[in-house]
Image (cartoon, helix red, strand yellow):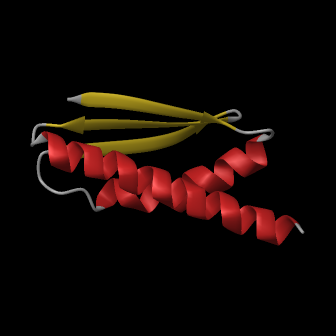
């Protein structure tokens, strides 16, 4: 199974902050699960590949989106 999640931000600085916030997850993936997150200009692109079961794959996507949401909320608070 494979998924690519692309998020677009208003500026590169925000995209970089979000990518950095979720990138540590790239190194904590269980066996059979591969996750990469990179910033491409104003985009944050995450690729997820899994040789495991669908529930783990789906939980990984859910966890990623939760972490992105948390990073976005923190950035909104900091910008105030």
Percent position of residue 10, x then y? 80, 38
Between 43 and 61, the one nearer to me in the picture:
61
Number of residue marks: 0
Q: Give the left or right position of residue 35, taking residue 41 as reference.
A: left
Q: Residue at x 11, y 37 (%)?
A: 51
22 on left or right of 56? right
From this view, report whether residue 62 is shown above or below residue 77. above
User: Residue 21, how many percent across, how many down?
Assistant: 55, 61
Pinpoint residue 40: horizontal percent, then vertical percent.
Answer: 61, 32
The image shows residue 18, relative to residue 11, as above or below, that is below
The residue positioned 72% from the left and 39% from the top of the image is 9
Residue at the location (48% across, 58% down)? 66
- Residue 62, how many percent across, how many down? 38, 51
Give the answer, above or below, for where 38 lies relative to 2. Answer: below
Q: Nearer the viewer, residue 55 or 8?
A: 55
Q: Is residue 68 left or right of residue 15?
A: left
- In this picture, is 29 found above or below 51? below
Q: Identify the image quadrant of residue 57.
A: top left
Q: Residue at x 20, y 29 (%)?
A: 1
């Amino acid at each position: 199974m494979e998924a690519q999640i692309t998020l677009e931000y208003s500026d590169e600085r925000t995209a970089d902050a979000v990518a950095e916030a979720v990138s540590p997850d790239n190194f904590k993936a269980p066996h059979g699960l591969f996750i990469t997150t990179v910033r491409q200009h104003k985009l944050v692109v995450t690729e997820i590949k899994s040789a495991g079961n669908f529930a783990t794959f789906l939980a990984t996507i859910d966890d990623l989106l939760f972490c992105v949401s948390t990073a976005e909320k923190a950035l909104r608070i900091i910008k105030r």
